[in-house]
Image (tube, coloured by chain):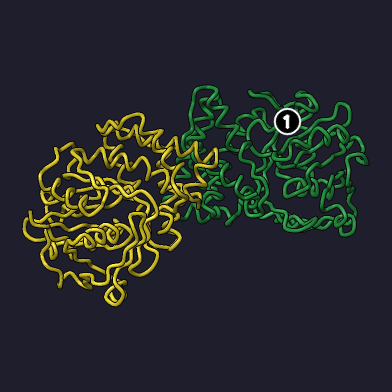
Chain colours: A yellow, B green
Amino acid sequence: MEKQRYAVVGAGALGGLYGGLLARAGFEVHFLLNRDYDHVVANGLRVDTRLGDFHLQDVHAHASVETMPPCDVTIVGLKTTKNGLLKDLLPSPTREGGVVLVLQNGLHSEADTAAVVGPERVLGGCCFLCSNKVGPGHIKHVDQGRVVFGEYGDHAIDVTPRVQRIADEMVSAGIDAHATGNLPMTRWKKLMWNIPFNGLSVALNASTKEIVDDPDALELAETIVREVHAAAAACGVNVAEKAIAATIDVTKEMVPYDSSMRLDFLAKRPMEVEAILGNPIRAAKAVGFTMPHVETLYRELKFLDRRSR
Amino acid sequence: MEKQRYAVVGAGALGGLYGGLLARAGFEVHFLLNRDYDHVVANGLRVDTRLGDFHLQDVHAHASVETMPPCDVTIVGLKTTKNGLLKDLLPSPTREGGVVLVLQNGLHSEADTAAVVGPERVLGGCCFLCSNKVGPGHIKHVDQGRVVFGEYGDHAIDVTPRVQRIADEMVSAGIDAHATGNLPMTRWKKLMWNIPFNGLSVALNASTKEIVDDPDALELAETIVREVHAAAAACGVNVAEKAIAATIDVTKEMVPYDSSMRLDFLAKRPMEVEAILGNPIRAAKAVGFTMPHVETLYRELKFLDRRSR
């Protein structure tokens, strides 16, 4: 089967890593770049990863979507805070019939993409990934790396051939990629980590290690994990009970890590407060379930986000 | 009636102000001082207040309780985080039969004093006061000033002659003092302010004005005021519904103010997290009522308190 052609919109910590791995494996990958464009054209893309550091000198780099060819798969790695740009970015690289794979944080983050290209062309997924952009065209993949994606919808949808094909191609490129027949489950499981650890890392100005090493911060993190687990159940997504302890355990074993939200906060960039906390709160509220611990964190983060800019 | 003799243990923002006003009015007031002793002996006590700035050159200053005479009323203005000192400080200045007036923040803050002198000799009260110690022997009273006190107990107790007498003496000294027959009500009403505004001022590193000026911080503060109001009701203390809006309104009209907890935090002193948040949470939990918003704040503050020292 012929290799699909990929576009990466938002070539940061996530798009740079996965797009880079696909390009290294011989896939044609077109990167839409913003501030890093000149640097990448001159110096290529550098990826430090436990999978084996690599450097791609010749990259299909684009400063504008207008130069991008139609692609089979467009990977959206933008922050959700930039979703207002999608209406101008997505139509060009995504060929007629091509799909858009939204690998953004949060819940219902696919909705903005679906509004542009139509929900039937949207896949969604979560990255369980510690990766940062440490300089222009320079990605540092610190830990983890799994990506799980599937058809977009608010209920389980069996893995389709197009989802399986992308997963197979990613696996062939060395990516720990998995197709899922239950995207809502995947998203809520990730929220069980993202809400407490992104949120508290900003509210407490602390790394994941500082949080799990402190008895009170750990107790609060566990309480929030439980609350998100219960909210998922209220929304009809029954994550296994053992995922609660596993979420904490994986964080204890993780290298000390600054969450993406904390990095955004420290850099005075907009934080993904609505995608990661606001949307789950509203989804739960719509079915009559309240999340008071998460709401407290949400309001604090909204305040901090507003003040930091 | 002869004027009573007063002792002030903890002559800071609160003890310095009220003790200073009593001394200015001709009461014999003995101040127990710690680091400020030498300064006050040399320079006296300076109080800047909207009630009229004053300076007391000759102050009954003591570096140790051993030089303090037996007093009729001992005012405890120490931070609750120093209550471990009370067993050594209280017996000396409080004459046999004299009372101890605990003007500390929080709930059940009188318990440590009661353990030393016996509950029958304990009065408790709350100060609705914006006052700071701005230098050695120098108090700056910024806003408000009301003090409300009564017999110590977990239920309403009619105003006794000894409570009324102290209130009358304070009023004669220009203090906005009020006797109450319902100390638990007074304490919970103060907690409706202290929990949100002390707590959020540290968690958000913000003044009261920044909190009430931000829509999300204000929403969170209001939610917490409601939660404390409901916890009080669960504990049998029915604060009027209108106190919820009044608590927010008074803060909107207040001059921008750094709460005592924020000042402690910024100075890396221990914060009164247990007295102001921990004790109310536990009192509510004992009657089956949970305070999830306050608990979130409590855990955050415990973390911040531990890390700051």
The answer to whether A137 is drawn above or below residue B24 in the figure is below
**So how many labels did they put on this image?**
1
Q: Considering the numbered disc 1 on the image, is that residue within a helix, a strand or a loop?
A: helix
Please report, as a chain letter, where disc 1 is located. B
**Residue pointed to by mark 1:** B112
Residue B260 visible, this angle: yes
Q: Residue at x 37, y 52 (%)?
A: A130
Along the line of sight, which residue is nearer the eye, A213 or B89?
A213
A289 sits left or right of B231 in the view: left
How far across and how far down the image is residue A283, in percent?
28, 40
How far across and how far down the image is residue B142, in percent?
66, 55
How far across and how far down the image is residue A188, in percent?
30, 39
Direction front: furthest residue: A52
Density class for disc 1 (Cα within 10 Å; few <14, some 14-19, many ≥20) is some
Along the line of sight, which residue is nearer the eye, A304 or B93?
A304
- Dividing the picture into quadrants, the one containing residue B165 is top right
Residue B297 visible, this angle: no
Q: Amino acid at mark 1?
A: Asp
Along the line of sight, which residue is nearer the eye, A168 or A70?
A168
